[in-house]
């Protein structure tokens, strides 16, 4: 004897809505966790760039404070012009400060933001409409 083929039981509208709500809730929780992880990573990169700026400021301060006096004095004795020696020293340390600031700026620009979160959030409308294949 053969068993008649039974069709799978149909789910009620309430069950379907419950499934959709649960899936949407899971999706949103996962997106929030991804956003948090990416934000932490971006914050670490931003802190590194900020540290470069802080290091540039401290180094520039101490260099200007100690070495510029010594260089100004040496150039003033050699040139017999304290004013021009002060201008030369100021220009040299301005170049040093500019180089350090550019390095800090380059590190800050390496912060990528929330690229993975943005990409996956763009896929949500297709998933909600049942067109997951468009996300591939």
Image (spheres, rainbow, N blue to C red):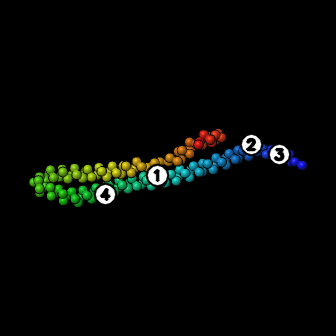
The label on residue 58 is 4
* Residue denoted by label 1: 42
Residue 119 lies in what quarter of the image? top right
Tag 4 secondary structure: helix
Tag 1 secondary structure: helix
Q: Earlier in the sequence, mark 2 or mark 1?
A: 2
Q: Are marks 4 and 2 in contact (CB under 8 Å)?
A: no
Q: State how far apart marks 3 and 1 are (Cα).
A: 54 Å
Tag 3 secondary structure: loop
Q: State how far apart marks 4 and 3 are (Cα).
A: 79 Å
Residue at position x 61%, y 48% in the image? 27
Mark nearer the viewer, 4 or 1: 1
Question: Within 10 angstroms of label 1, few (less than 14), some, or many (20 or more) residues?
Answer: some
Residue 29 position in % (x across, y down): 60, 51
Q: Are marks 4 and 3 in contact (CB under 8 Å)?
A: no
Mark nearer the viewer, 2 or 1: 1
Q: Earlier in the sequence, mark 3 or mark 1?
A: 3
Q: State how far apart marks 2 and 3 are (Cα).
A: 21 Å
Residue at position x 87%, y 48% in the image? 2
The label on residue 13 is 2
């Amino acid at each position: 004897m053969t068993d008649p083929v039974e069709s799978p039981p149909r789910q009620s509208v309430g069950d379907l809505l419950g499934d959709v709500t649960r899936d949407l809730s899971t999706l949103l929780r996962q997106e929030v966790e991804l956003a948090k992880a990416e934000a932490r990573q971006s914050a670490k990169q931003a802190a590194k760039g900020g540290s470069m700026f802080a290091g540039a400021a401290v180094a520039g301060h101490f260099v200007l404070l100690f070495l510029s006096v010594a260089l100004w004095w040496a150039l003033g004795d050699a040139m017999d012009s304290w004013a021009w020696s002060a201008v030369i020293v100021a220009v040299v340390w301005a170049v040093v400060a500019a180089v350090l600031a550019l390095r800090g700026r380059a590190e800050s620009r390496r912060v990528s933001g929330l690229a993975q979160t943005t990409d996956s959030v763009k896929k949500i409308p297709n998933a909600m409409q049942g067109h997951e294949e468009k996300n591939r």
